[in-house]
Image: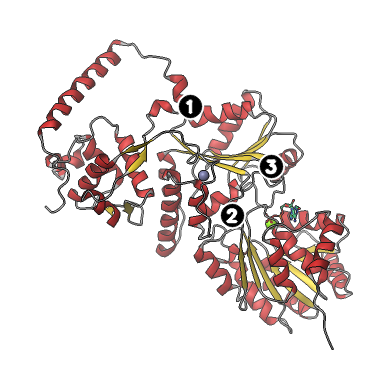
């Protein structure tokens, strides 16, 4: 007998009939097609990319039931409500139901009255549930937020490890489909291995949605920036993520004081208040949600016009997930990351606070380092993001990110680079960024003197810049691959082969002109106010004299900074 497989045309028809969408999106087509042919499939689509439809449509075309593993009760309920409203027979089973309700739903599934059944992964560990499921014709197990199975992901959940034993306990192995927005190689590998996907087709698509204008802003007065931004975008929905509850409360209060319809959301609030806030945001009663990363998983609000990060998140996965909540409707939206060096301190503190084994910790530090590099890169941010996730791209600048739109001219920074690299070399590549900056600035701090670094020829060779500016420059060189940082809590700066070429004069370093601190938007406003107190004036004059003397002194010594074989 000739069994005819359902076709893509049929799938498209159902998409139009139930969802009212004219066609599948980029990425969805291949995933749906793969599932229709009965192949295990791993679909990696950005947040808002439309993963649900990838298994919901095949579920309608499959002979039996599709069991959906979903991590959050609220998420399940929303999805099932939406499906039911469209006339698709779906249900969930979770701890909010009574025993009778659970039985009713299992009975409905047995009668073939359900196409989709949503459950939390913990349920798969229960013997009685496995028993019940083994008596149902399960065609497909769809694992949503599949990165939760990996320790490398940002929401590891032990119970996800129960998925594969569950699948194997079924009398007939169903097709397994896994979905996530996280595409790092480690996580991808883990998903295939730990979910025991059988020769899966893997589809990765559209990480950098081009309706999102990405920015990283350094040196802003963050609070002023946010108040100003929220004020000028008052009519639009936005999310502001902050790292701590205290910052959330604080920003929220300030926004409200400024008369902006802001809400807040963090794990320190009661369930009721949180639910109310979420509702208010969904229905546009409040415009701006100030939240910790507890907010957002499964939020289906398509018209979020901006996502601002008050702090740098802990890694790129988290960032992409959170920033990706902007512009799900495809309309132009902004993702702004406000970075300051203090964010690095905070994230390291959080890693240290978190009890975990050394391997895990090392991984966290490495991911943090990559996040920091993203904040310092001069590359197109879309490239940087796609490169991080190992996605192929056409090397065309997006023309729409803070790097692409950076109008500072490129200047030859070869000499500064040589000074910095040479200093690192002379310090035997054994110290961190701030120590190198102290030496270059000419700091008299105890550690500098104790190591005798004040005797190095590179000591105080960058007196004009603040230590902060020197650190920024070093971090930019890390991001550009001239330098690297070792792993761990106290990373040490090392030279790469690229730096050696610069030292030997074989490579030029072109960088954006460093932005003076006052040039930040907030700073520009401030710079109209001069501090004319006598002590301030004297200090400036004194500093200028010192610099002139230093310059003269520098003319005398031959460029001794280009010495690399001592
Ligand atoms: P994800 O789980 O990948 O974050 P969802 O499945 O929640 O994304 O889908 C995000 C939004 O995109 C939803 O509002 C969904 O209805 C919409 N969507 C999905 N596929 C399509 C499509 N082919 N055409 C138009 N809208 C779509
Ligand atoms: Mg989803
Ligand atoms: Zn760009």
Marks 1/3: CA–CA distance: 26 Å
Q: Is residue 458 left or right of residue 125?
A: left
Whichever of callouts 1 and 2 sits on the residue coming sooner in the sequence is 2
Residue under the image location 54 percent in, 46 percent down: 398
Residue under the image location 45 percent in, 61 percent down: 356
Whichever of callouts 3 and 2 sits on the residue coming sooner in the sequence is 2
| Disc 1 + disc 2, Cβ < 8 Å | no
Residue identified by numbered label 2: 207
Q: Residues within 10 Å of mark 3 (few under 14, many from 20)?
A: some
Quadrant for residue 60, please give it.
bottom right
Residue identified by numbered label 3: 331
Residue identified by numbered label 1: 521
**SS class, disc 2:** loop
Quadrant for residue 234, please give it.
top right
The mark lying in front, picked from 1 and 2, is 2
| Disc 3 + disc 2, Cβ < 8 Å | no
Marks 3/2: CA–CA distance: 16 Å
Q: Between residues 534 and 409, which one lies in front from this camera angle?
A: 409
Quadrant for residue 211, please give it.
top right
Q: Which mark is residue 318?
A: none
The mark lying in front, picked from 1 and 3, is 3
Q: Between residues 294 and 298, which one lies in front from this camera angle?
A: 298
Residue 116 in sight: no
């Amino acid at each position: 007998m000739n069994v005819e497989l359902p076709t893509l045309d049929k799938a498209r028809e159902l998409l139009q009939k139930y969802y009212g969408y004219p066609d599948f999106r980029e990425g969805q087509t291949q995933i749906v097609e793969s599932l229709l042919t009965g192949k295990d499939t791993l679909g990696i689509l950005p947040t808002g990319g439309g993963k649900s439809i990838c298994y919901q449509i095949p579920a309608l075309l499959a002979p039996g039931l599709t069991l959906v593993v979903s991590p959050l009760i609220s998420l399940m309920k929303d999805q099932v409500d939406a499906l039911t409203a469209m006339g698709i027979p779906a249900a969930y089973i979770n701890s909010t139901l009574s025993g009778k309700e659970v039985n009713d739903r299992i009975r409905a599934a047995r009668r073939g009255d359900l196409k989709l059944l949503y459950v939390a992964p913990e349920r798969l560990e229960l013997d009685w549930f496995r028993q019940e499921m083994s008596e149902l014709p399960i065609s497909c197990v769809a694992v949503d937020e599949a990165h939760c199975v990996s320790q490398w992901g940002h929401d590891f959940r032990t119970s996800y490890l129960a998925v594969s034993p569950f699948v194997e306990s079924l009398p007939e192995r169903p097709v397994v489909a896994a979905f996530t927005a996280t595409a790092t190689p480690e996580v991808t590998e883990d998903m295939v291995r730990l979910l025991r996907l059988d020769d899966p087709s893997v589809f990765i698509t559209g990480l950098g949605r081009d309706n999102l204008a990405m920015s990283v802003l350094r040196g802003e007065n963050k609070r002023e920036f946010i108040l100003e931004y929220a004020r000028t975008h008052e009519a639009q929905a936005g999310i502001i993520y902050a790292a701590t509850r205290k910052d959330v409360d604080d920003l929220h209060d300030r926004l409200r004081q400024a008369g902006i319809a802001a809400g807040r959301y963090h794990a320190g609030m009661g369930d009721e208040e949180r639910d109310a806030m979420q509702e208010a945001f969904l229905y546009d009663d409040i415009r701006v949600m100030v939240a910790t990363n507890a907010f957002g998983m499964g939020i289906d609000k398509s018209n979020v016009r901006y996502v601002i990060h008050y702090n740098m998140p802990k890694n790129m996965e988290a960032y992409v997930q959170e920033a990706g909540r902007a512009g799900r409707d495809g309309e132009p939206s902004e993702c702004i990351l406000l970075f300051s060096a203090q964010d690095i301190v905070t994230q390291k503190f959080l890693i240290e606070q978190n009890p975990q084994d050394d391997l895990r910790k090392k991984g966290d530090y490495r991911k943090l380092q990559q996040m920091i590099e993203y904040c310092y890169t001069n590359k197109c941010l879309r490239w940087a993001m796609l490169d991080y996730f190992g996605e192929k791209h056409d090397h065309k600048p997006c023309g729409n990110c803070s790097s692409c739109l950076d109008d500072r001219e490129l200047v030859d920074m070869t000499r500064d680079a040589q000074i910095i690299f040479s200093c690192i070399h002379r310090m035997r590549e054994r110290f961190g960024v701030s120590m190198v900056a102290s030496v270059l600035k000419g700091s008299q701090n105890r550690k500098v003197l104790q190591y005798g670094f004040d005797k190095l020829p590179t000591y105080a060779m960058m007196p004009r810049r603040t230590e902060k500016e020197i650190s920024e420059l070093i971090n930019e060189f890390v991001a550009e691959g001239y330098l690297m940082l070792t792993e761990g809590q106290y990373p040490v700066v090392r030279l790469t082969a690229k730096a050696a070429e610069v030292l030997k004069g074989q490579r030029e370093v072109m960088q954006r002109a460093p932005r003076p601190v006052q040039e930040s938007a907030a700073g520009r406003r401030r710079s109209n106010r001069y501090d004319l107190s006598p002590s301030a004036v004297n200090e400036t004059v004194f500093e200028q004299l010192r610099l002139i003397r230093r310059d003269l002194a520098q003319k005398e010594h031959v460029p001794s900074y280009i010495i690399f074989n001592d």
